[in-house]
Image (spheres, rainbow, N blue to C red):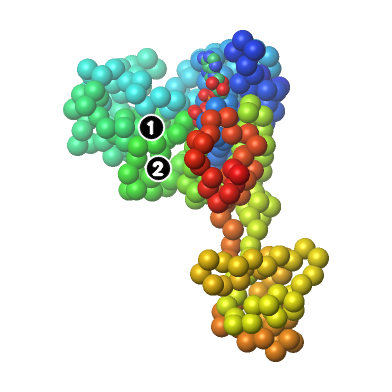
Amino acid sequence: MIRAQSLTKKYGDKTAVDHLDFTIRPGKVTGFLGPNGAGKSTTMRMIVGLDAPTAGTAEVDGRAYRDLAAPLREVGVLLDARAAHKQRTAYKHLLALAATHGIGKRRVHEVIGLAGLESVADKRVGGFSLGMGQRLGIAGALLGDPGTIILDEPVNGLDPEGIIWIRTLLKGLAAEGRTVLLSSHLMGEMAQTADHLIVMGRGSILIDEPLDQVMADATTSAVRVRTREADRLTSAVAAPGVTVANHPDGSLEITGRTAEQVADAAAAAGVVLYEVTTVAGSLEDAYLALTSGAVEYRSASTTPNGAFA
Ligand SMILES: Nc1ncnc2c1ncn2[C@@H]1O[C@H](COP(=O)(O)OP(=O)(O)OP(=O)(O)O)[C@@H](O)[C@H]1O
């Protein structure tokens, strides 16, 4: 379990992390999301003792990271996939890491297998692609068979097969009762991996909820309808809270009514419908809308779905 209490980090005048309170529980994959500069990396660095909090505390299983006797055996960390010594082979890198904790060669071979690095274990890390570096970082994080795993952007650079691999791996680790925390910018990817989401914006927590709850709260669905009698249908469904919009493909998109209610209203008004479909809102859109007020670095030309407008 990871617990932050009033966790705060200031860099000069800049408050990177502002009085965070959260508990990350075992047995689940917790996704840590937020736009660039939201404070995710700073929070993770404080959890693993790489940055000292300006105020507040971060603890793993009730202790500060620096007080853990054998950190590698308790917390597996991947914060920077490029951190390995470039001249060493993957095997030597892991062996050196293992030696700091009295971990044997057998486990080194095991994590090489787990990370799918067998064919490149004797290659120098300097020649690794970003994706291979991520796999090596994950192998290192798992070396001590830790109960808590913290990964910053682990899917960065991974190919589709690698993304599925890590998704399965992390779910498996959580199912074994471990605490798994991973950060990402990609809501779509998180939606497939995480059980619980913490969304940060400008140093604060915007959401700390189970994924199902976030999906239920944040996504709105609409009813897509095709008809030749758009005006009559619009009048038939008109009510407070109901919106009807013209879709570029010629259909109508109605919110505030279920598909059944739309079909019933159309039937009562004698309007013929050629299509009635429920269209679920995307979690990605909901995330962009949620964090749009907290985006620090924004491209002037970016207006996805009007979420930033
Ligand atoms: N060493 C530092 N000195 C000064 N400011 C810093 C330092 N590290 C981070 N910051 C600032 O703190 C804020 C939070 O940064 P952080 O890297 O934690 O965000 P993040 O959510 O991890 O972003 P990203 O998704 O881009 O990695 C940013 O405004 C960043 O510029």
Q: Residue 261, image x and y in percent?
A: 72, 76
Which residue is drawn at the image coordinates 56% and 72% (left, top)? 251
In the picture of the structure, the residue carrying the numbered disc 1 is: 138
Q: Tell me where residue 267 sits by quadrant.
A: bottom right
Query: Relative to 234, does residue 171 appear above or below in the rendering?
Result: above
For marks 2 and 1 on the same chain, the one whose residue lies earlier in the sequence: 1
Q: Nearer the viewer, residue 62 or 287?
A: 287
Q: Which of 8 and 241 is in front in this view?
A: 241
Q: Residue 230, image x and y in percent?
A: 64, 78
Identified by mark 1, the residue type is Ile
Which residue is drawn at the image coordinates 29% and 17% (left, top)? 85
Between the C-alphas of marks 2 and 1, the distance is 9 Å
Q: Can residue 258 be seen in this view?
A: yes
Q: Residue 203, image x and y in percent?
A: 63, 26
Identified by mark 2, the residue type is Ile
Query: Relative to 66, does residue 118 appear above or below in the rendering?
Result: below
Q: Which of 97 and 258 is in front in this view?
A: 258
**Marker disc for residue 21:** none
Which residue is drawn at the image coordinates 44% and 25% (left, top)? 79
Q: Tell me where residue 250 sits by quadrant.
A: bottom right
Q: Residues within 10 Å of mark 2 (few under 14, many from 20)?
A: some
In the picture of the structure, the residue carrying the numbered disc 2 is: 166
Q: Nearer the viewer, residue 33 or 232?
A: 232
Q: Is residue 63 visible?
A: no
- Classify mark 1: helix, strand or loop: helix
Label pair 2/1, CB-CB below 8 angstroms: yes
